[in-house]
Amino acid sequence: MQRRKTVFSWLGLLMCLAVVLLPAAALAQDNDNSGLAGLALGGVMLFVIFAFAAAFYVYLALALQTIANKTNTPNAWLAWIPIANTFLALMIAKKPLWWFLLLLIPLVNIVIWIMVWMAIAEARAKPNWWGIMVIVPVMNLVMPGYLAWAA
Protein backbone atom coordinates (compact mmCIF):
# COMPACT_ATOMS: atom_id res chain seq x y z
CA MET A 1 0.00 0.00 0.00
CA GLN A 2 2.92 2.29 0.26
CA ARG A 3 3.27 2.51 -3.50
CA ARG A 4 1.21 5.69 -3.68
CA LYS A 5 3.36 7.58 -1.25
CA THR A 6 4.83 10.02 -3.75
CA VAL A 7 1.64 11.91 -4.56
CA PHE A 8 -0.12 11.44 -1.27
CA SER A 9 2.95 12.21 0.80
CA TRP A 10 3.17 15.69 -0.67
CA LEU A 11 -0.58 16.16 -0.63
CA GLY A 12 -0.78 14.93 2.94
CA LEU A 13 2.08 17.17 4.00
CA LEU A 14 0.39 20.21 2.48
CA MET A 15 -2.94 19.33 4.10
CA CYS A 16 -1.30 18.80 7.50
CA LEU A 17 0.46 22.12 7.23
CA ALA A 18 -2.83 23.78 6.36
CA VAL A 19 -4.56 22.11 9.32
CA VAL A 20 -1.83 23.31 11.66
CA LEU A 21 -1.19 26.77 10.27
CA LEU A 22 -4.72 28.00 9.53
CA PRO A 23 -6.02 27.66 13.11
CA ALA A 24 -2.75 29.12 14.43
CA ALA A 25 -3.12 32.13 12.14
CA ALA A 26 -6.74 32.56 13.20
CA LEU A 27 -5.82 32.35 16.89
CA ALA A 28 -3.10 34.96 16.40
CA GLN A 29 -5.66 37.59 15.38
CA ASP A 30 -7.26 39.95 17.89
CA ASN A 31 -10.92 39.14 17.17
CA ASP A 32 -12.69 37.03 19.78
CA ASN A 33 -14.64 34.94 17.27
CA SER A 34 -11.71 34.21 14.98
CA GLY A 35 -10.21 31.64 17.35
CA LEU A 36 -13.30 29.47 17.29
CA ALA A 37 -13.65 29.83 13.53
CA GLY A 38 -10.05 28.75 13.01
CA LEU A 39 -10.47 25.74 15.27
CA ALA A 40 -13.66 24.77 13.48
CA LEU A 41 -11.96 25.09 10.11
CA GLY A 42 -9.05 22.97 11.31
CA GLY A 43 -11.41 20.33 12.64
CA VAL A 44 -13.36 20.19 9.39
CA MET A 45 -10.17 19.92 7.35
CA LEU A 46 -8.88 17.16 9.60
CA PHE A 47 -12.17 15.26 9.24
CA VAL A 48 -12.04 15.58 5.43
CA ILE A 49 -8.45 14.32 5.36
CA PHE A 50 -9.34 11.31 7.50
CA ALA A 51 -12.43 10.57 5.39
CA PHE A 52 -10.38 10.58 2.16
CA ALA A 53 -7.66 8.45 3.76
CA ALA A 54 -10.22 5.91 5.01
CA ALA A 55 -11.94 5.71 1.61
CA PHE A 56 -8.60 5.26 -0.15
CA TYR A 57 -7.54 2.55 2.32
CA VAL A 58 -10.80 0.64 1.79
CA TYR A 59 -10.39 0.89 -2.00
CA LEU A 60 -6.82 -0.43 -1.89
CA ALA A 61 -7.69 -3.22 0.54
CA LEU A 62 -10.63 -4.34 -1.60
CA ALA A 63 -8.47 -4.26 -4.74
CA LEU A 64 -5.66 -6.26 -3.13
CA GLN A 65 -8.09 -8.78 -1.64
CA THR A 66 -9.77 -9.23 -5.03
CA ILE A 67 -6.40 -9.71 -6.73
CA ALA A 68 -5.46 -12.30 -4.09
CA ASN A 69 -8.74 -14.17 -4.60
CA LYS A 70 -8.36 -14.17 -8.39
CA THR A 71 -4.78 -15.45 -8.18
CA ASN A 72 -5.76 -18.13 -5.61
CA THR A 73 -3.38 -16.70 -3.02
CA PRO A 74 -4.22 -17.96 0.48
CA ASN A 75 -5.16 -15.55 3.29
CA ALA A 76 -6.64 -12.81 1.11
CA TRP A 77 -8.00 -11.18 4.28
CA LEU A 78 -4.45 -9.96 5.02
CA ALA A 79 -5.21 -7.08 2.66
CA TRP A 80 -7.03 -5.34 5.52
CA ILE A 81 -4.11 -5.44 8.00
CA PRO A 82 -1.66 -2.54 7.48
CA ILE A 83 1.75 -4.29 7.39
CA ALA A 84 0.44 -7.72 6.48
CA ASN A 85 -0.91 -6.38 3.18
CA THR A 86 2.68 -5.87 2.06
CA PHE A 87 3.38 -9.54 2.72
CA LEU A 88 0.22 -10.43 0.81
CA ALA A 89 1.42 -8.39 -2.17
CA LEU A 90 4.74 -10.25 -2.03
CA MET A 91 2.91 -13.59 -1.91
CA ILE A 92 0.75 -12.64 -4.91
CA ALA A 93 3.89 -11.63 -6.81
CA LYS A 94 5.61 -14.86 -5.75
CA LYS A 95 8.57 -12.90 -4.40
CA PRO A 96 10.50 -13.93 -1.27
CA LEU A 97 9.12 -12.47 1.93
CA TRP A 98 12.52 -11.09 2.95
CA TRP A 99 11.98 -8.46 0.25
CA PHE A 100 9.97 -6.70 2.95
CA LEU A 101 13.31 -5.61 4.38
CA LEU A 102 14.19 -4.06 1.01
CA LEU A 103 10.95 -2.10 1.14
CA LEU A 104 12.20 -0.40 4.28
CA ILE A 105 15.22 1.12 2.49
CA PRO A 106 14.56 4.55 0.97
CA LEU A 107 14.78 4.75 -2.84
CA VAL A 108 15.31 0.98 -3.05
CA ASN A 109 11.66 0.53 -2.09
CA ILE A 110 10.54 2.35 -5.25
CA VAL A 111 12.36 -0.15 -7.47
CA ILE A 112 11.15 -3.11 -5.40
CA TRP A 113 7.53 -1.93 -5.51
CA ILE A 114 7.74 -1.58 -9.28
CA MET A 115 9.09 -5.13 -9.53
CA VAL A 116 6.39 -6.45 -7.18
CA TRP A 117 3.57 -4.76 -9.07
CA MET A 118 4.99 -5.96 -12.39
CA ALA A 119 4.84 -9.51 -11.04
CA ILE A 120 1.30 -8.93 -9.74
CA ALA A 121 0.25 -7.72 -13.20
CA GLU A 122 1.77 -10.87 -14.73
CA ALA A 123 -0.07 -13.00 -12.15
CA ARG A 124 -3.30 -11.39 -13.35
CA ALA A 125 -2.34 -12.09 -17.01
CA LYS A 126 -1.89 -8.41 -17.79
CA PRO A 127 1.18 -6.81 -19.42
CA ASN A 128 3.95 -6.39 -16.90
CA TRP A 129 4.47 -2.73 -17.82
CA TRP A 130 1.38 -2.00 -15.70
CA GLY A 131 3.69 -2.33 -12.71
CA ILE A 132 5.57 0.76 -13.83
CA MET A 133 2.33 2.71 -13.39
CA VAL A 134 3.06 2.75 -9.66
CA ILE A 135 5.26 5.81 -10.17
CA VAL A 136 2.83 7.69 -12.45
CA PRO A 137 0.80 10.05 -10.23
CA VAL A 138 -2.81 9.42 -11.29
CA MET A 139 -2.35 5.97 -12.76
CA ASN A 140 -1.14 4.65 -9.41
CA LEU A 141 -4.71 5.17 -8.18
CA VAL A 142 -6.32 3.44 -11.15
CA MET A 143 -3.87 0.53 -11.51
CA PRO A 144 -4.89 -1.59 -8.46
CA GLY A 145 -8.55 -1.33 -9.46
CA TYR A 146 -7.77 -2.26 -13.06
CA LEU A 147 -5.72 -5.27 -11.99
CA ALA A 148 -8.44 -6.33 -9.55
CA TRP A 149 -11.63 -5.87 -11.51
CA ALA A 150 -10.68 -5.92 -15.21
CA ALA A 151 -11.60 -9.06 -17.09
Image (spheres, grey):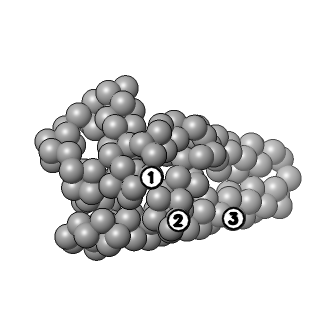
Rendered view: 104 above or below 89:
above
Residue 98 picture quarter:
top left
Query: Tag 3: residue type?
Result: Val
Residue 36 placement: quadrant: bottom right
Query: From mark 3 to mark 1, how far is it between C-alphas?
Result: 41 Å
Is residue 107 shown left or right of residue 139?
left
Query: Judging from the image, what secondary structure is the residue with disc 1 in?
Result: loop
Give coordinates of residue 1: x percent, y percent: 40, 52
- N-terminal of the pair, mark 2 or mark 1, is 1
Residue at (27%, 36%) from the top-left corner? 104
Q: Is residue 82 visible?
A: yes
Tell me the residue at 28%/38% (across/down). Answer: 103
Helix or strand or loop: what does disc 2 sit on?
loop
| Label of residue 150 in the image | 2
Vertical position of residue 114 compared to residue 61: above or below: above
Residue indicated by mark 1: 126
Residue drawn 27% across and 57% down?
A: 92
Give how far across and how far down residue 17 sits, in percent.
62, 41
Q: Are marks 3 and 2 in contact (CB under 8 Å)?
A: no
Of the pair 81 and 38, the residue shown nearer to us: 81
